[in-house]
Image (cartoon, grey):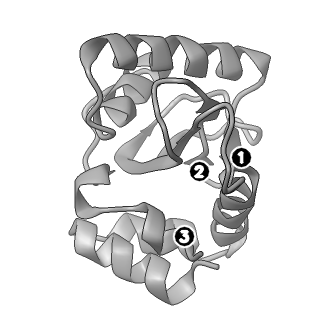
Amino acid sequence: MKLREFFTAESVKLNLEADSKDEILKELIQLLDLDDKSEGILFKTLKRRENLGSTGIGKGIAIPHCRSLVVNELRLAYGRKPDGVEFQAIDEAPVHNFFLIVAPPLEVSNQYLPVLGKIAQFAKDPDIPDTLGQISKPEEFLALLEERAP
């Protein structure tokens, strides 16, 4: 299963409007198209995860992730904040690229950790942050995943 298969054009937002970590998380959650109650539960779960340690992995990339009953299958979203936002990343630099991963607590396919690993591997490529910054349409993001992601 390739990373590209977990994203749709609707789950990609190239101009996040939020200016804080909490608001960025809320905006990413909205890309999953859940009801209001589920969005609230998911936000609290992601906040709890972030309080354990930031999911900002450096080089302008964060991978907020959690397990939650509000989804019945693995769900992903991508958001970009061209100006960046303070996210307490490991390198203390602003984060521009956000890969949201949400999985149910029990997952038959067991893809949560492998997908997290694939995104981290994709993000480690030295030119990926710059390449992500040059994308102008969700379809270009999907094509980049198709071409370069494991």
Quadrant into which the N terminus falls: bottom right
Label 2 vs label 3, nearer the camera: 3
Quickly name the residue at label 1: 57
Rounded to the nearest angstrom, the CA distance separating label 2 from label 1 is 6 Å
State the image coordinates of residue 129 (x, y, percent, origin top left). 54, 65
Q: CB atoms at circles 2 and 1 under 8 Å apart?
A: yes
Hey, what amino acid is under mark 2?
A: Ile
Rounded to the nearest angstrom, the CA distance separating label 2 from label 3 is 16 Å
Q: CB atoms at circles 2 and 3 under 8 Å apart?
A: no
State the image coordinates of residue 101 (x, y, percent, origin top left). 55, 44
State the image coordinates of residue 120 (x, y, percent, origin top left). 70, 60
Labelled disc at residue 15: none
Report the front residue among 45 and 50. Answer: 45
Q: Earlier in the sequence, mark 2 or mark 3?
A: 3
Rounded to the nearest angstrom, the CA distance separating label 3 from label 1 is 18 Å
Q: Is residue 114 above or below residue 63?
A: below
Quickly name the residue at label 2: 61
Snapshot quadrant of residue 17: top left
Q: Is residue 120 above or below residue 93?
A: below
Q: CB atoms at circles 3 and 1 under 8 Å apart?
A: no
Q: Earlier in the sequence, mark 3 or mark 1?
A: 3
Instruction: Identify the secondary structure beneath mark 1.
Output: strand
> How packed is label 1: few (under 14 Cα within 10 Å), some, or many (20 or more)?
many
Quickly name the residue at label 3: 3
Snapshot quadrant of residue 105: top right
Q: Which residue is at a point 75% across and 51% down the rendered structure image?
A: 113
Label 3 vs label 1, nearer the camera: 3
Instruction: Identify the secondary structure beneath mark 2.
Output: strand
